[in-house]
């Protein structure tokens, strides 16, 4: 849906159908809503997800392995679909691990990262035969003990906290303190310890941030990650088999955001593959993407309950809100609230248009899905659509807040 070359909100305004109704998943939105049977709901478009993976694969060198970071959208049907399209799945909890193991993905292509893994999570992961990204020396000891109990050499990679960090504006040196990964300076000692234990060493994992729209900054971080990993590999207890350099590919959400330019990333990844082939023949290069694969393939749909005036301003009060879609309300880590692309799905352009705020049913001013946005003049029963909602939607929202029902979720 994101015609390259257009900022996101403009691109979404190009979605026109003959009857002025949004088409999604091959159906007019009104028909899709009838199919679901209730509002609010999330809908994810199977064809768009497949198309996104295909176009990414076409753009990137074939040697790059593509993993899905499951936390972006853990709906089982979505995970199952992606399992058939990507090369691996990355999980961050025992619950996510179980979901990934329920798919057709081979356990050897599933990896498990995240701080604070419990003994039970580690034990289950070792038994399953997945790759575990260790986040600390203490975790490494627990992992080795779990392997001993099960009589299995746990498959392990070291998650490195590098001495650089990717920020919105570019890369900077001095990554600093964080609860994730092992500080680069402490990695050689950890590698020496791995050599003493009964473990199957695979390689390294370096996280390269999230939601970055600068290909130059991302390419710089990827190059730095490969460089650091090759340096650390000198002290490794075995050959480098897997190098996961994270993802960080961003998606346009806000007015003026432009889609990520893949061409410079592809060029850079080609160079990194070459470096890797020379220094660590046989090592596999993985990138792990969450939102980039699913965000643009999803919408959140809620219904206008009432059109209300206050001091001359129009509020569309809907049955959906921040309890289902925290990110669209601007409260999921955003510093400044900006509007996601929002439209009236059953009258995209409409006749009369007006400036409105779209709010939810919660008794808090935070429950805001659109603030003073122009859209078609809506009335009760109309369908409000929040675009770019396929990632960090339902599972990243406080669904228990105020006790409203859960939304439906469909893959179409
Ligand atoms: C969350 C996460 C990702 C995915 O981030 P996106 O912004 O959704 O691409 C990748 N790697 C790790 C380790 C993560 O925790």
Image: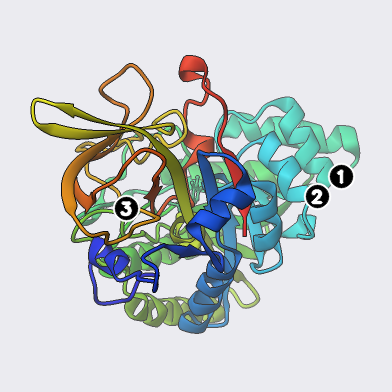
Q: Which residue is mark 3?
A: 343
On residue 2, which mark appears? none
Q: Nearer the viewer, mark 3 or mark 2?
A: 3
Q: Earlier in the sequence, mark 3 or mark 2?
A: 2
Task: Report the quarter where the C terminus lies.
Answer: bottom right
Q: Where 347 falls versus 125 (above or below)?
A: below
At x 51% / y 83%, what residue is drawn? Answer: 58
Q: Which residue is mark 1?
A: 152
- Alpha carbons under labels 2 and 1: distance apart: 9 Å
Left or right: 317 in relation to 186: left
At x 31% / y 64%, what residue is drawn? Answer: 12
Q: Is residue 204 visible?
A: no
Q: Where 402 falls versus 120 (above or below)?
A: above
As helix, strand or loop, the secondary structure at mark 3 comes to strand
Circle 3 residues within 10 Å: few <14, some 14–19, many ≥20? many
Q: Earlier in the sequence, mark 1 or mark 3?
A: 1
On residue 129, which mark appears? 2
What colour scheme does the image use? rainbow
Task: Report the quarter where the N terminus lies.
Answer: bottom left
Q: Are marks 2 and 1 in contact (CB under 8 Å)?
A: yes
Q: Nearer the viewer, mark 2 or mark 1?
A: 2
Picture quadrant of residue 281: bottom right
């Amino acid at each position: 849906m994101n015609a390259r070359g257009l900022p996101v909100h403009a691109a979404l305004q190009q979605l026109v159908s003959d009857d002025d109704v949004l088409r999604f998943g091959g159906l007019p939105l009104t028909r899709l809503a009838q199919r679901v049977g209730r509002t609010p709901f999330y809908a994810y478009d199977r064809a768009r997800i497949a198309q996104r993976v295909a176009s990414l694969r076409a753009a990137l060198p074939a040697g790059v392995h593509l993993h899905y970071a499951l936390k972006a959208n853990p709906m089982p049907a979505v995970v199952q679909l992606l399992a058939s399209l990507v090369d691996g799945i990355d999980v961050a909890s025992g619950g996510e691990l179980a979901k990934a193991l329920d798919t057709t993905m081979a356990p050897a292509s599933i990896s498990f990262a995240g701080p604070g893994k419990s003994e039970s999570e580690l034990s289950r992961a070792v038994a399953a035969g997945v790759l575990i990204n260790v986040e600390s020396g203490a975790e490494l000891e627990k992992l080795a003990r779990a392997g001993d109990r099960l009589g299995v050499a746990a498959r392990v990679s070291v998650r490195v906290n590098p001495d650089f960090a990717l920020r919105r504006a570019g890369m900077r040196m001095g990554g600093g303190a964080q609860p994730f990964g092992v500080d680069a300076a402490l990695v050689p000692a950890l590698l020496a310890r791995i050599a003493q234990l009964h473990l199957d060493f695979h390689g390294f994992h370096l996280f390269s941030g999230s939601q970055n729209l600068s290909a130059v900054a991302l390419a710089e971080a990827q190059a730095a990650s490969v460089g650091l990993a090759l340096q650390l590999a000198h002290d490794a207890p075995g050959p480098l088999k897997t190098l996961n350099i994270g993802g960080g590919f961003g998606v346009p959400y806000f007015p003026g955001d432009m889609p990520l330019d893949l061409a410079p990333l592809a060029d850079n990844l080609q160079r990194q593959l070459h470096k890797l082939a020379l220094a660590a023949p046989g090592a596999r290069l993985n990138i792990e993407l969450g939102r980039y694969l699913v965000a643009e393939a999803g919408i959140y749909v809620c219904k206008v309950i009432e059109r209300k005036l206050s001091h001359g301003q129009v509020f569309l009060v809907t049955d959906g809100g921040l309890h289902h879609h925290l990110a669209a309300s601007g409260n999921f880590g955003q510093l400044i609230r900006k509007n996601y692309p929002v439209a009236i799905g059953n009258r995209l352009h409409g006749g009369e248009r007006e400036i409105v705020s779209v709010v939810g049913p919660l008794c808090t001013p935070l429950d805001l899905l659109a603030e003073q946005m122009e859209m078609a003049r809506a009335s009760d029963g109309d369908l409000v659509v929040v675009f770019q909602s396929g990632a960090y939607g339902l599972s990243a929202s406080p669904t228990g807040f105020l006790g409203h029902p859960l939304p439906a979720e469909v893959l179409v």
